Image: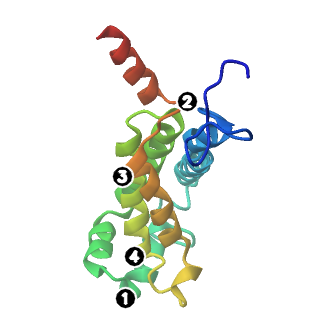
Amino acid sequence: MGGHTYRSRAGNGTAGDEPRGGLRAIASRYALLPLRIFLGVTFVYAGLDKLTDDRFMAASGTGSVGELMRSVRDSSAVPWLVDLALKNPEAFGQAIAFGELAVGVGTLAGLFARLAAAGGALISLSLWLTVSWQSDPYYYGNDLAYLMAWLPLVLAGASVLSVDAALAARRRRSR
């Protein structure tokens, strides 16, 4: 049997069992990788898109972060947060863009993965409470779905193909 230890659901080693560390174990280890890649690429793209869009980074005008904040102010769940952003819309736009970029890179690399995911969740939460709060029904706004997508990565981190996993393996070897 190729040296594999087989285990049945009952644990009695009967024929037809899957090897320990088999497909299910591999699938479990890599289950969050597609989510990590999707969120990482999406947030890198979103950050770069904002940073390279002169219209978005403006305090006013069509397509600007300032205009967006003014348009959602009265329907936001947290108008005080929108008011804070409106004090300096350009700085707020840059903070969101650089935050998205940092979260995306950290998520893709698996560097401080839980912290990056918490940052992504915080960005998504703030966008849900401000920009997409007025979506009716609520599931039309995508920021709530992004918030929920970040939570498994906040809880689990990046256990495979990540800087965090490589550093953890190095620490284990040095003990």
Q: Which mark is residue 118?
A: 3
Residue 48, given in percent of the width and then of the height, sits at 56, 47
Image quadrant for the C terminus?
top left
Q: Looking at the image, is mark 4 or mark 1 earlier in the sequence?
A: 1
Residue 76: image quadrant is: bottom left
Question: Does dot 4 land on a helix, a strand or a loop?
Answer: helix
Q: Looking at the image, is mark 3 or mark 4 earlier in the sequence?
A: 3
Q: Nearer the viewer, mark 3 or mark 1?
A: 3
Q: Nearer the viewer, mark 2 or mark 1?
A: 2
Residue 44: image quadrant is: top right
Residue at position x 35%, y 17% in the image: 172
Q: Nearer the viewer, mark 4 or mark 1?
A: 4
Q: Looking at the image, is mark 2 or mark 1 earlier in the sequence?
A: 1
Residue at position x 58%, y 54% in the image: 53
Between marks 3 and 4, how big is the CA–CA gap?
A: 18 Å
Residue at position x 58%, y 50% in the image: 35
Residue 20, given in percent of the width and then of the height, sits at 59, 33
Residue at which label 4 appears:
130
